[in-house]
């Protein structure tokens, strides 16, 4: 049986390597040509190109590996079925599970590998890529990002934002520290929420505290409603910071969610991303399982073009479904855990149903 496993894995790994190479090459080529104007306009150095390549490769690998595994399973079993090797093995008493067991075991190991990459490697690559593309090449002013807050300086003001929602064009937990030329605090403005309207930020409620710059004593406290604030940023400027969730791993996102919810903020988006950190790696196992019945049902009529087209079609359907469910999760139409795991569950059920229809 070990000899058969080596035979199956040899075919599988060869096709998997070719699939990964093809997908990574196509993805990198398209992505690079989309960004080449930024590299040229800002006179990027050879180090910038190498940094882009180094940080992009792990991120691309995580995204395309499930589709590559699906294609490898479909083409491997399809090829064996076309040459009647699958039929011969089953005629010798080898069950269908024994045939696909090496593929499932390898897919499980790759799922665990992706889980570890998402936790320990990908956040650092995403941070380096964001730093290169957004700050160094596009020349955007960098804001200081902690795991749950945004800090930046605008003239004689220091601005802190607890939570950004560029889609709804709102900022939550905004605090503005007005300082003098000696960096002494003169005034502190606090607003629970800012909404962007008419090219300006509107605070429905604003509390202003004035301080003596020399002693730091509180001089006065005032509250006002419907106040227009100028903070030197637009919702588009904060869009990049919202995407910085990809710089956080599962544990960091979980701490962020707990802190935001403890302070009374809505952490739905962060909770969806947190669950996606666990759900996304196991797509590899789901795709490997789904590829088995698709390959076996074709039998001797299988061919390479059909296998590639089928794999791409399944991948596109999965991507569309996952994107829709994630959007529903961000808008709180679905619970975060449901939005993250439903695609895997649906495709797993489809695979089970199709596998049951395959004749032994």
Image: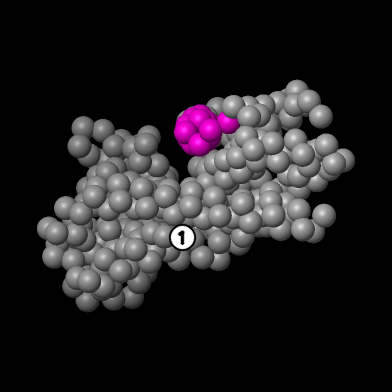
Residue at point 19%, 70% (across, down): 45
To which quarter of the image does residue 325 belong?
A: top right
Residue at point 43%, 48% (across, down): 23
Residue marked by disc 1: 58
Q: Nearer the viewer, residue 175 or 124?
A: 124
Task: Classify 279 as above or below 323.
Answer: below
Left or right position of 343 against 58: right
Q: Nearer the viewer, residue 40 or 277?
A: 40
Numbered circles on residues, count: 1
Left or right position of 231 against 7: left
- Colour convention of the picture: one colour
Left or right position of 62 against 258: left
Look at the image and tell me whether residue 321 can be seen: yes
Q: Please provide the residue range marked out in magenta.
A: 302-318
x and y percentages locating residue 292 in the rendered image? 67, 36
Q: Nearer the viewer, residue 105 or 217?
A: 105
On-image quarter of the N terminus: bottom right
x and y percentages locating residue 4 in the rendered image? 76, 53
Residue at point 37%, 48% (across, down): 27
Task: Classify 48 as above or below 208.
Answer: below
x and y percentages locating residue 158 in the rendered image? 29, 62
**Magenta stretch holds residue 313:** yes
The secondary structure that dominates the magenta segment is helix
Q: Nearer the viewer, residue 146 or 99?
A: 99
**Magenta stretch holds residue 152:** no
- Describe the element under mark 1 as helix, strand or loop: helix
x and y percentages locating residue 178 in the rendered image? 26, 62
Look at the image and tell me whether residue 273 can be seen: no
Q: Residue furthest top?
A: 357
Residue at point 20%, 54% (across, down): 36
Q: Give the crowd class for mark 1: few <14, some 14-19, many >=20 residues within 10 Å.
A: some
């Amino acid at each position: 049986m070990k000899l058969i496993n080596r035979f199956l894995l040899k075919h599988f790994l060869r096709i998997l390597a070719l699939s990964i190479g093809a997908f990574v090459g196509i993805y990198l080529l398209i992505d690079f040509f989309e960004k080449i104007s930024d590299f040229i306009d800002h006179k990027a150095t050879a180090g910038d190109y190498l940094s882009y390549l180094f940080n992009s490769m792990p991120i691309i690998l995580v995204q395309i590996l499930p589709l590559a595994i699906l294609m490898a399973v479909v083409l491997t079993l399809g090829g064996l079925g076309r040459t009647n090797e699958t039929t011969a093995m089953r005629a010798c008493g080898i069950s269908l599970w024994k045939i696909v067991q090496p593929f499932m075991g390898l897919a499980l190991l790759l799922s665990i590998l992706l889980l570890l990459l998402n936790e320990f490697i990908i956040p650092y690559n995403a941070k380096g890529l964001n730093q290169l593309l957004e700050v160094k090449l596009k020349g955007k002013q960098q804001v200081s990002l902690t795991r749950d807050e945004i800090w930046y300086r605008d003239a004689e003001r220091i601005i802190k934002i607890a939570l950004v929602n560029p889609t709804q064009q709102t900022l939550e937990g905004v605090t503005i520290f007005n300082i003098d030329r000696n960096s002494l605090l003169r005034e502190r403005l606090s607003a629970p929420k800012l909404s962007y309207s008419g090219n300006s930020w509107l605070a429905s409620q604003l509390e202003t505290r004035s301080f003596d710059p020399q002693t730091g004593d509180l001089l006065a406290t005032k509250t006002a409603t419907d106040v227009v604030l100028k903070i030197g940023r637009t919702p588009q400027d904060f869009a990049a910071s919202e995407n910085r969730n990809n710089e956080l791993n599962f544990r960091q996102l979980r701490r962020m969610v707990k802190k935001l919810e403890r302070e009374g903020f809505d952490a739905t988006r962060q909770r969806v991303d947190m669950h996606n950190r666990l759900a996304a790696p196991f797509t590899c196992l789901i795709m490997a399982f789904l590829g088995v019945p698709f390959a076996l049902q074709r039998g001797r009529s299988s061919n390479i073009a059909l296998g590639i087209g089928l794999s791409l079609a399944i991948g596109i359907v999965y991507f569309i479904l996952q994107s829709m469910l994630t959007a529903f999760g961000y808008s709180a139409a679905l619970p975060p855990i449901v939005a993250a795991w439903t695609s895997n569950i649906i495709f797993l059920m489809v695979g089970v149903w199709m596998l049951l229809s395959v004749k032994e």
